[in-house]
Image: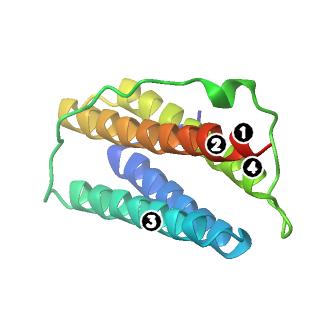
Amino acid sequence: MKYFRNVDEILDFAIKEEEKARDFYLYLAKRVERPAMQESFKEFAGEEQKHKERLLEVKEGKRSAKKVEEVPDMKMSDYLVDVTPKKDMDYGDALILAMKREKAAYRLYTRLAEVVDDENLSKVFKSLASEEAKHKMAFEVEYDEHYMSEN
């Protein structure tokens, strides 16, 4: 993991990661054909934007942690091969890519929650990890119900 000198560096890093996630979902929204999935990816981009805004508020001292929810892990992404984004990506590959990214975001926030000394900040990261786990589960359910049943 990257070495951080202070809390601001941790928060700046997390904010940039949320920006990347938002941009990634907007990218996918332009590349999938199913209108429902285009909308879904746009909604996830909006969720990542909310995460960014929440982190900015934490950094500015305007917000504290919220309740952490436990999210079941279907572990589907553990058994799928990695895919890289491409212009002609099919629906299943887009879902796999999204699952893998959400899993990585979950791991990032879980790890950040472990390394910070500030209890409130740790709770913020745990809460964000929980939200990323929800995103991953939504993609796993979509993959299982729609993609797997069609193939």
Q: Alpha-carbon distance for marks 4 and 1?
A: 8 Å
Q: Secondary structure at mark 1?
A: helix
Looking at the image, which residue sits at the far front? 150
Q: Residue at x 54, y 37 (%)?
A: 3
**Badge 3 or badge 4: first in the primary sequence:** 3
Q: Position of residue 146 (x, y in %)?
A: 64, 47
**Badge 2 or badge 3: first in the primary sequence:** 3
Looking at the image, which residue sits at the far bottom? 30
Quick check: can you spot residue 2?
no
**Badge 1 or badge 2: first in the primary sequence:** 2
Q: Nearer the viewer, residue 8 or 14?
A: 14
Q: Amino acid at mark 3?
A: Glu
Callout 4–callout 1 Cβ contact below 8 Å: no
**Badge 4 or badge 2: first in the primary sequence:** 4
Callout 4–callout 2 Cβ contact below 8 Å: yes
Q: Residue at x 52, y 31 (%)?
A: 107
Per the image, the residue denoted by label 2 is 143
